[in-house]
């Protein structure tokens, strides 16, 4: 689907960049997360740290819904896929049901 929007070369670059950013972010989180969690739990307590994490999650979800495309980002690919299937030109024999005995 990305190839349809950006072209083959740009889609490959975008895919590589997204994979790189995801891998780097995950590695950073795997290193920093336990250290931060240990110190935050020790100094502030489990309940407070859990509340802060819930607030951060809620804030990021609201940012995504308001500025990141939100629900339309989830619905548009499905609609575009249905439209692209509707545009396909099938052979006449492909339109017949499979259980047709004649």
Image: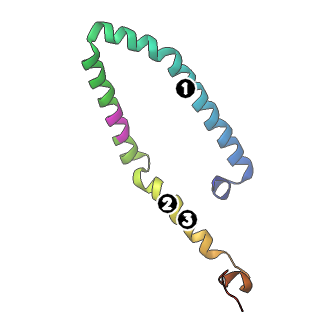
Secondary structure, mark 2, is helix
Which image quarter: residue 93? bottom right
Q: Which image quadrant is residue 4 in?
A: bottom right
Q: Is residue 89 magenta?
A: no
Which residues fall within the magenta stretch?
Answer: 57-61
Q: Secondary structure at mark 1?
A: helix
Q: Position of residue 97 (x, y in %)?
A: 65, 83
Residue farthest to the front, as pictured = 101
Q: Residues within 10 Å of mark 2 (few under 14, many from 20)?
A: few
What residue is at 32 percent from the left and 36 percent from the top? 58
Q: Earlier in the sequence, mark 1 or mark 2?
A: 1
Is 1 left or right of 65, judged from the image as shown? right
Residue sitting at x 67%, y 87%: 100
Q: Residues within 10 Å of mark 1 (few under 14, many from 20)?
A: few
Question: Could you tell which of marks 3 and 1 lies nearer the N-terminus?
Answer: 1
Name the secondary structure under disc 3. helix
Q: Percent x, y for residue 24? A: 59, 25
Q: Are marks 1 and 2 in contact (CB under 8 Å)?
A: no
Q: Position of residue 78 (x, y in %)?
A: 52, 61
In the rendered view, would you say 75 is above or below 85?
above
Residues at discs 3 and 1 in contact (Cβ within 8 Å): no
* Residue on which disc 1 sits: 26
Say which of marks 1 and 2 sits in front.
Answer: 1
Tell me the quarter of the picture where residue 47 sits: top left
Q: Which residue is mark 3?
A: 80
């Amino acid at each position: 689907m990305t190839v349809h929007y950006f072209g083959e070369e740009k889609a490959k670059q975008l895919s590589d960049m997204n994979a790189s950013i995801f891998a780097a972010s995950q590695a950073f989180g795997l290193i920093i997360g336990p250290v931060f969690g240990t110190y935050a739990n020790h100094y502030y307590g489990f309940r407070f740290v859990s509340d802060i994490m819930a607030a951060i999650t809620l804030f990021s979800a609201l940012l995504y819904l308001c500025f990141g495309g939100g629900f339309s980002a989830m619905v548009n690919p499905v609609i575009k896929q249905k439209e692209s299937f509707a545009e396909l030109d099938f052979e006449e024999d492909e339109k017949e049901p499979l259980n047709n005995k004649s």
